[in-house]
Image (cartoon, rainbow, N blue to C red):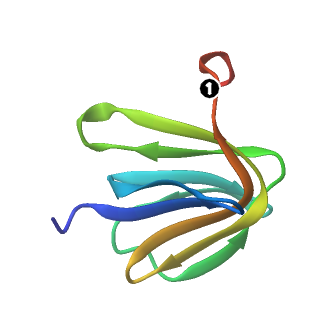
Amino acid sequence: MANQLHVEVVAVEEKVWVGEAEMLVARTTEGEIGVLPGHAPLLGLLKEPSQVRVKLAGGDQLTYDVAGGFLSIDANGVTVLAESATPASPESR
């Protein structure tokens, strides 16, 4: 699937979520970034605290509260390397 983005959300202790998505949105210290398949390579520092949103095929979305860490985009997809990443509560989305 060329229109899918491989995403890994990883915290210090564990892989939180791994899968294919249509888009990832994260807030870095430079501002909010949307990542689609084919995005140019990038390494960004995540704003602390913030949220990472993973938009899945079919319109579903996963949201994680993250603290610290980095966002790494390469030819294989995007990896969120956070100090902590927990599913966001519905009222904070």
Q: Residue at x 40, y 53 (%)?
A: 23
Residue 65, placed above or below residue 1: above
55 vs 80, left or right, is left
Helix, strand or loop status at disc 1: loop
Specify the farthest residue to the front: 13
Percent across and percent down for residue 66 are 72, 48
**Residue type (three-letter) at the residue carrying disc 1:** Arg
The quadrant holding residue 72 is bottom right
Specify the farthest residue to the top: 91
**Disc 1 marks which residue?**
93
Q: Residue at x 30, y 33 (%)?
A: 59
The quadrant holding residue 36 is bottom left
Residue 78, placed above or below residue 50: below
Specify few, some or many for label 1: CA neighbours under 10 Å numbering under 14, 14-19, or 20 or more. Answer: few
Q: Residue at x 72, y 63 (%)?
A: 12
Percent across and percent down for residue 33 are 59, 58
75 vs 82, left or right, is left
